[in-house]
Amino acid sequence: MCFPVFQSLAQLENLCKQLYETTDTATRLQAEKALVEFTNSPDCLSKCQLLLERGSSSYSQLLAATCLTKLVSRTNNPLPLEQRIDIRNYVLNYLATRPKLATFVTQALIQLYARITKLGWFDCQKDEYVFRNVITDVTRFLQDSVEHCIIGVTILSQLTNEINQADTTHPLTKHRKIASSFRDSSLFDIFTLSCNLLKQVRKPNLNLNDESQHGLLMQLLKLTHNCLNFDFIGTSTDESSDDLCTVQRIFPFIVLIPPFLFILSIASVRRSLFNNAERAKFLSHLVDGVKRILENPQSLSDPNNYHEFCRLLARLKSNYQLGELVKVENYPEVIRLIANFTVTSLQHWEFAPNSVHYLLSLWQRLAASVPYVKATEPHMLETYTPEVTKAYITSRLESVHIILRDGLEDPLDDTGLVQQQLDQLSTIGRCEYEKTCALLVQLFDQSAQSYQELLQSATASPMDVAVQEGRLTWLVYIIGAVIGGRVSFASTDEQDAMDGELVCRVLQLMNLTDSRLAQAGNEKLELAMLSFFEQFRKIYIGDQVQKSSKLYRRLSEVLGLNDETMVLSVFIGKIITNLKYWGRCEPITSKTLQLLNDLSIGYPLKLVKLSAVQFMLNNHTSEHFSFLGINNQSNLTDMRCRTTFYTALGRLLMVDLGEDEDQYEQFMLPLTAAFETVAQMFSTNTFNEQEAKRTLVGLVRDLRGIAFAFNAKTSFMMLFEWIYPSYMPILQRAIELWYHDPACTTPVLKLMAELVHNRSQRLQFDVSSPNGILLFRETSKMITTYGNRILTLGEVPKDQVYALKLKGISICFSMLKAALSGSYVNFGVFRLYGDDALDNALQTFIKLLLSIPHSDLLDYPKLSQSYYSLLEVLTQDHMNFIASLEPHVIMYILSSISEGLTALDTMVCTGCCSCLDHIVTYLFKQLSRSTKKRTTPLTQESDRFLHIMQQHPEMIQQMLSTVLNIIIFEDCRNQWSMSRPLLGLILLNEKYFSDLRNSIVNSQPPEKQQAMHLCFENLMEGIERNLLTKNRDRFTQNLSAFRREVNDSMKNSTYGVNSNDMMS
């Protein structure tokens, strides 16, 4: 900025005003762009100080604090230590002299202090950790006015929260090390301070109506809550008596103000902290606190308090056994109060509906524990559980009329929430099941009779019909749930008979509703029916079910369904009915086809004998199943369910297919006709593009379902010979025409990825067959065609980049990986005979990879998995190709491996370890060869690769540091995978490893250094300088022992590693 300082500040303040106050989007975006440039400007630091000193608005102070936070957080070109110390001191003085800043400015400055402190936790100056004196820093705030006290407490609270949270810009290993050191050196002191301050403010003249006093108390509770919520991984558990004392100290605050978040943290304290006597005492305090709240429930009228209290009740049972709860002194009274509270809450269904989950979770856990409780004290659940079940059922039924009358949001629209609650009710309802069943039969009969009478009445109002349909929808859902709950309890014949009564009623209702589908139907009731069928299938259909079950006896008596085959015919009949009448309703079609798919997996031999199934196999056209049609489709993605349909049909077809090509061709006639239609369209210069797209997308989704189901060689070869070479050009042409439309390209690419996937060794070509090579040529052609065209899209908006570009690239990676690892192609013949198919595919992969930023590789899970899986195959079988790449490409790949090593996805991390192992092994072998006197020189690719690695040793060294860090400091879940590349990394970087070892040893307390040195000596004991399997296995065994010894050695150590060490 070349203008004077004051003009510069005035302009900055004006930009802040535009950013935070203007309603004009263009002006705001322009201001945001200018402020981003300011943040990256060289004089940003000095201008921020001027903004804080001379700025006239709170927004300019907020900008300064935010910019300073970004400056101290950056990983490249970090600020010098002295400068960060100055900023820390300046912020503390600024807050101390200006206690009445705008709240958001104070919060931003405290965030800045917390970030500086966290990132500088291991920074030393004159052998002193300069950022660790946090309690000293805030002491002057705590000794001043109430406003200053609030700032001091907020600083500690924000710092605790900041250190407890990992960020993506710094290594996870560094975060864990800082968090562990903070936990061991400062957290307990901060927690003790917060408890003492709470004790001080708890005095008779405390006025909660005073805003400052109320604010101070809330900040203290928040600080205590943050301390209790800290991630205590690896903490020793020998301070249980102190914790118990603290709990006793704090519970009286429930009377003053309901700090339910805080109490929830107290209730979450691990059981292992206490011995049996202490645990009983701790639980007694918790239950007593709950009892006092329930006896004085005024504070629960606030929705937030109510919600957190419901969470507290659920936590009681998740942390403690029913046998422990019943021994609490006031248990009978408390369980009565909790039951009454639950019943009242369920009856007021419109109040805080999201809290119902926690109440049902409590009763679900209690009911599930009944068979296992050994205590002699009565649990009284046989009294209260039926009350809870009845309250839930009746309240849902009563809500239907009110929702329809007032136009309220219907809970049934949220099928996920309904299913979650029903899963919980399934266990609750099975406790005292006789009462549950009697209630359901009574309510169902009442609603079904009223519904039938309304349908027969010419004067029935639509509202009355809708109310009864809504009530029946809930009842069908609940009946399905309680039948599914049979799996949680040992069932008796009497209970099976009760299930039979319920099942008969639902099937009778289904017959009634199906008979009316030509005139009208209810979508929600149909979805409830499908949910019921799914539960019924899981429990009562299958070889494990006793066919003498009283349920089947009752079905035979009432409906004439004498055996399982007849019941399956009812299932298939319902499926066909739904597909006929509900083909345009995606939720019903999708769930119906999922039911068909599940049946085709479990009972294919029984299903193919049914005439209805044979009808589907012979008539799978849009004439009989409207969802297979291409007209009036609003969206191409609505065709997804077709894949599920044809997967099920493919499984059923395979049962009797064998080698019968005539039967196969008969089955494929509709698909053959569709392909011919598309081919005819493509052969003309002008055709209806939308019709062609719909026909092709529907067709390839159908084929993908069949290809997935055909997992045997004989059947898959029929499909392959049908599609190649006749119809493959049509798929290639579609990619050429519509590469920019993912709704078209994604189904085509997924079909190709399925065709090249050697699932169950189905791709086994004859010795004289060239089909494996021909299939890979088509694969290469499709990848190359799509890849070259998708790269011409130009810049894609960030919010659309995955849908428009990265998803297709991810599928191409999966396709190439499947083809390369399928073991049905000898890839050596391509170069031998001058065929460029393999080179084209690999070069396209590189071009696509270089178009993806590193951050995107890990931000999108499916892309991560497909990329690292492909890279693993390339480094294992095509290392010569990797070695021949340009230096910047090799460094890109190595960087992606380095970042993937610390990924949260274990599959990605394991894949990176495998890739790194292959690369390191290749390097080690080539280096070994180069030092030996041999007549055969190194290949040009190997020589270049060695040269690149020798020019950039820091990359391999960084990965050695990362792997060692993870093994020593992290909760390493794939230790074996980590151990495989580590030996090669050490042998390639022996001097660096020695320096690394010395750094770690010297970072330990003097009395522990010898033990740490011995750990490293034992790690390499008996290890030879080679990568033979025997040597690797010995190293892996040594590493397991090393990790145990290092963890034991470092336990209780508060020493950290300097910020310039291996973790920086």
Image (cartoon, rainbow, N blue to C red):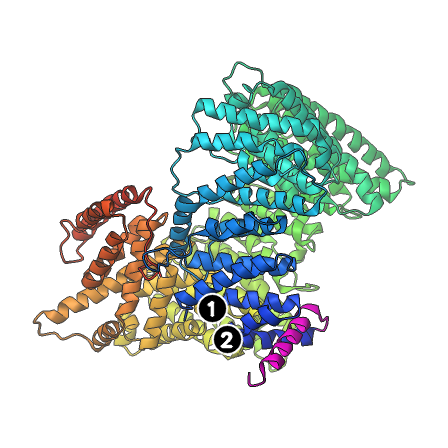
Residue nearest the observer in this picture, 608 or 637: 637
Q: Is residue 374 at all visible to an observer of this figure?
A: yes
Which amino acid, mark 1?
Ile
The quadrant in which residue 503 appears is top right
Magenta stretch encompasses residue 14:
yes
The answer to whether one can see residue 681 in this image is no
Residue 1018 image point, x, y percent: 18, 47
For the N terminus, which image quadrant? bottom right
Tell me residue 629's x, y (percent): 66, 61
Find the magenta span and give its range.
1-24
Residue shown at 29% from the left, 49% from the top: 976
Determine whether label 2 and label 1 are within 8 Å by CB.
yes
- Which label sits on residue 971? none
Distance CA(mark 2)–CA(mark 1): 9 Å
Q: Which residue is mark 2?
A: 790
Q: Tell me what residue is drawn at x 65 percent, y 27 percent.
A: 292
- Residue 784 position (above or below residue 384): below
Crowd tier of the residue under label 1, counting other residues whose Cα lies within 10 Å: few below 14, some 14–19, many 20 or above: many
Q: Which mark sits nearer the N-terminus, 2 or 1?
A: 2
Left of 550 or right of it: where is 711? left
Residue at the farthest bottom position: 2
Q: What's the residue type where badge 2 is placed? A: Ile
Establish if 466 lies above or below 98.
above
Q: Residue furthest top?
A: 376
Is residue 784 in the magenta section? no
Instruction: Report whether 29 appears left or right of 1010.
Output: right
Near-viewer residue (459 or 988):
988
Residue situated in front as seen by the camera: 765 or 181: 181
Q: Which residue is mark 1?
A: 809
* The C terminus lies in quadrant: bottom left
Query: In the visual, does 664 lie left or right of 712?
Result: right
